[in-house]
């Protein structure tokens, strides 16, 4: 396959035409009476017409046939997606999923749509406010069918296998360690070349943005120039047996037939496009003196809510980097969080949990559920020599953080993520190095105040082991030890 070309720049106003049809973009207007090559002009709006210019998203597509040339949609029962978060009871436990098993092509052919599984989510899809986290497991390409999402944007994170994604704007090759975003309403089809697996974050009613940099300044984290947009490419292909257009609408799947490929856009211009990003280009910013910067410093993209500083969802990564903080416990700190955190491992191993959390699996720490390094990690890091060291080489961890505010009545109702059963491992169910063994037991290594004072006053002079033993027993019985 020839190397694909792209346009660079996040959210830029771009224009592209297939070189097979030079001059296919109208000059000086959007909707001429007769378009070049007798194409149809069609606008794709990603925002309300009256949104401020800074947030207004739309593109004009010039296509062989308009999108409306299809037969009626009918409901289909396919895939494993849901939006009804009340189907399951809430579960505050730390949860972990083993690597999700990919179906064998020899047993059953599964493409991207039929291999889409919902793991968890929150919010109200009908009011365009919330999110869902899915996993996709597929072994075959989408043949003569495409998919689009009427509910929100897809952020796709391949973990195993390359994705060749056909869109109305052109083609993208997305590999593990890259991500792509297919925005609301954009039709796409995915070719795969092997058994393929990945994570998918869906947000309703908003679009992903680059996070504000604040005191960081003009440069840092994900650079706008590193986001790549496909160039125009089209196929004028008749499909006698019927081409299937699958639509996810209010959480349900519908299908319609048409006689031609939908990827018949010869030219386009606008700022509402699909795009991809290579995670290796992320500019890491971190502590160079002591203590930790909070993990928000690793945010690649954010989907903002109406509340300043609180996102519907953030896409965060923990990439290879240097660790140099002095006098500091360097692994991630122990934490209870008002945000829910879903983690997926693209490759390598996670520094805070090297057992049980494997590439292609996942973990979920819901709102205010305690989490942090396992006991072995704590012991090693507490005794480690604090020299500059490389962290997470050969590793890429993604994290999706979410807190959802759902306005129902007054006051608003806060809803946490609902979790669906998909081979999940809980603290009670886990065995042999899984989550339970990672989070407990921790030894009590608290130093009694008098032992600590003796150390401080005597400058490390050797103490009597009997005294330490006595102090330990007295401490356990809550009695003061006389000096």
Image: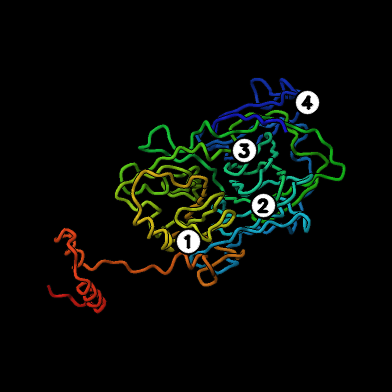
Precedes in sequence: disc 1 or disc 4: 4
Label 2 crowd (10 A; few <14 / some 14-19 / many >=20): some
Answer with the quarter of the image where residue 132 lies: bottom right
Mark pair 4, 3: CA separation:
26 Å
Q: Which residue is drawn at 66% across and 20% down?
A: 27
Query: Residue beneath label 1, please?
Result: 366
Query: Residue beneath label 3, please?
Result: 274
Query: Residue beneath label 4, please?
Result: 38
Q: Quadrant of the C terminus?
A: bottom left
Precedes in sequence: disc 4 or disc 3: 4
37, above or below 458, in the image: above
Is residue 322 found left or right of 14 in the rendered image? left
Mark pair 2, 3: CA separation:
19 Å
Mark pair 4, 2: CA separation:
32 Å
Precedes in sequence: disc 1 or disc 3: 3
420, above or below 314, in the image: below
Q: Which of marks 2 and 1 is in front?
A: 1
Q: What element carries label 2?
A: strand
Work out whether residue 334 or residue 10 is closer to the camera in this orientation and state it: 334
Q: What element carries label 3?
A: loop
Q: What element carries label 1?
A: loop
């Amino acid at each position: 396959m020839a190397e694909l070309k792209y346009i660079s720049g996040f959210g830029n106003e771009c224009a592209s035409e297939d070189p097979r049809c030079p001059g296919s973009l109208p000059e000086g207007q959007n909707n001429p009476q007769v378009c070049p090559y007798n194409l149809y002009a069609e606008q794709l709006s990603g925002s309300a017409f009256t949104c401020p210019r800074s947030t207004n998203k739309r593109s004009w597509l010039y296509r062989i046939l308009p999108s409306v040339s299809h037969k009626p949609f009918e409901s289909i029962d396919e895939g494993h997606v849901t939006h009804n978060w009340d189907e399951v009871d809430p579960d505050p436990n730390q949860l972990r999923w083993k690597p999700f098993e990919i179906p064998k092509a020899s047993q059953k052919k599964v493409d991207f749509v039929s291999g889409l599984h919902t793991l968890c989510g929150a919010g109200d899809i009908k009011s365009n406010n919330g999110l869902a986290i899915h996993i996709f497991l597929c072994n075959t390409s989408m043949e003569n069918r495409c998919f689009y999402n009427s509910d929100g944007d897809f952020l796709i994170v391949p973990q195993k296998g390359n994705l060749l994604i056909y869109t109305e704007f052109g083609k993208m090759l997305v590999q593990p360690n890259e991500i792509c975003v297919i925005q609301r309403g954009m039709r796409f089809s995915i070719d795969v070349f092997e058994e393929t697996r990945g994570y998918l974050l869906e947000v309703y009613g908003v679009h992903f943005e680059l996070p504000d940099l604040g005191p960081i300044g003009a440069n840092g984290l994900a650079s706008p120039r590193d986001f790549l947009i496909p160039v125009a490419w089209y196929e004028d292909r008749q499909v006698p047996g019927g081409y299937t257009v699958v639509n996810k609408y209010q959480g349900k799947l519908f299908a319609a037939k048409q006689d031609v490929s939908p990827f018949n856009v010869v030219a386009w211009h606008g700022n509402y496009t699909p795009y991809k990003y290579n995670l290796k280009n992320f500019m890491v910013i971190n502590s160079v003196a002591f203590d930790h910067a909070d993990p928000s410093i690793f945010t690649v993209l954010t989907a903002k809510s109406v509340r300043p500083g609180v996102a519907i969802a953030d896409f965060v990564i923990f990439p290879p980097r240097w660790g140099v903080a002095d006098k500091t416990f360097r692994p991630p700190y122990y934490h209870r969080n008002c945000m829910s955190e879903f983690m997926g491992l693209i490759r390598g191993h996670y520094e805070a949990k090297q057992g049980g959390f494997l590439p292609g699996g996942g973990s979920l720490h819901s709102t205010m559920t305690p989490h942090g390094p396992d006991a072995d990690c704590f012991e090693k890091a507490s005794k480690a020599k604090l020299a500059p060291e490389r962290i997470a080489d050969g590793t890429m961890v993604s994290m999706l953080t979410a807190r959802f505010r759902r306005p129902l009545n007054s006051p608003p109702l806060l809803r946490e993520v609902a979790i669906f059963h998909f081979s999940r491992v809980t603290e009670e169910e886990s065995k042999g190095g899984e989550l339970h063994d990672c989070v407990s037991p921790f030894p009590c290594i608290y130093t009694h105040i008098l032992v600590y004072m003796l150390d401080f006053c005597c400058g490390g002079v050797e103490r009597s082991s009997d005294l330490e033993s006595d102090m330990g027993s007295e401490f356990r019985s809550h009695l003061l030890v006389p000096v």
